[in-house]
Amino acid sequence: MTAAVTVWERGRLDARVGPRQVLFGRMYEDASIELEAFRPGGRILCIASAGCTAMKLAPQHEVVAVDINPVQLDYAARRINGDPGFRGRAERVMDFARFFAPLAGWWPSRVRAFVELDDPIEQMEYWQRQLNTWRFRTALDGLFSVTALRSVYSSPLLDFLPKHLGAVMRARMERCFAKHPNRSNPYARSLLLGELSPEPPPPEAKDIRLVHADAAGFLENEAPASFDGFTLSNILDGVDDAYRRRLLAAVKRAAAPGAATVLRSFSDRSANSIANRASDDRAMLWGSVLVRPVAEL
């Protein structure tokens, strides 16, 4: 087994030795991208994570959700069965940053007023006037410095990140605020206020098949041409070229004619691709959200 697989199999974001953790209490991936990309009625493979995307797809698709971290998979199962869930490791890291936000002028009342806006023009005016202060920019640059990130994340999960990440993340936030109304954007509320969506699972969630497996290994053992879509989160972030080739080969083998893929990345490497839908993803975190036919991989 290569290190490319064990990056996620360890079930930890940091490099410490210890038990696997629930990494994500929610998924910061806008499933409206998937709902548009996949034909209704198809069989879809997704990364289980916190179960959010699988539950969004379940009313219109046959969903198989895989995760290499058994602790995360168990958490997704509980959410699919109606448990409201809790804050994972990623949420706790963001909670730490929000605790110090008032020092940068981000008072809760000021941030909440921003989240309640529904006009992108007004949002950008408010952003520049009230929130995008020099203190905020300085704090974000420090928070996303290599030194700070290495205290939370292991090296394989950092090496692919763009340089000057603080400025990059501000630009991604502004891209979202300039296009999508905050009031109807649950991801803005999650990111800025730390509020997790209480949306219950749909009745069809009971039909989601959950599998403890590595995505490539699972697909290599499935019947050829048996999936109509693949949403792979950002599992290729932090893996080596050998695993990338292995996964894409497995996807091509398992893809039915006309199948599509959705693949996210924090990296900016594919930001200029015509297939990049990052600006449409209201979660605002991604450098690329590539939506492509499997035949074009």
Image (cartoon, rainbow, N blue to C red):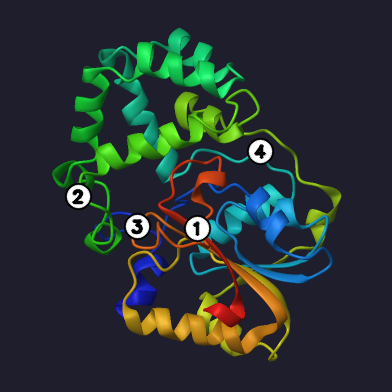
Which residue is denoted by mark 3 in the rendering?
Answer: 267
**N-term-proximal mark, 3 vs 4:** 4
Cα separation, mark 3 vs mark 4, equals: 31 Å
Q: Name the residue rendered at 24%, 26% in the picture.
A: 137
Q: Is residue 151 left or right of residue 190?
A: left
Which of pointers 3 and 4 indicates the residue nearer the eye?
3
Residue 276, labelled with which disc?
1
Vertically, is 255 above or below 170?
below
Q: Position of residue 3 (x, y in %)?
A: 30, 77
Residue at the farthest left position: 147
- Please, what is the three-letter code of the amino acid marked with disc 3? Ser
Cα separation, mark 4 vs mark 1, equals: 32 Å
Residue 175, labelled with which disc?
none
Which of pointers 1 and 2 indicates the residue nearer the eye?
1
Which residue is denoted by mark 2 in the rendering?
Answer: 150
**N-term-proximal mark, 1 vs 3:** 3
- Please, what is the three-letter code of the amino acid marked with disc 4? Pro
Secondary structure under the numbered disc 1 in the rendered image: loop
- Please, what is the three-letter code of the amino acid marked with disc 1? Asn
Q: Name the residue rendered at 40%, 40% in the picture.
A: 172
**N-term-proximal mark, 1 vs 2:** 2
Q: Position of residue 148 (x, y in %)?
A: 18, 41
Evaluate whether residue 226 shows in this view. yes
**N-term-proximal mark, 4 vs 1:** 4
Nearer-the-camera pick, 86 or 199:
199
Q: Position of residue 280 (x, y in %)?
A: 57, 45
Secondary structure under the numbered disc 3 in the rendered image: loop
Graded by Cα atoms within 10 Å as few (under 14), some (14 to 19) or many (20 or more), the crowding at tag 4 reads some
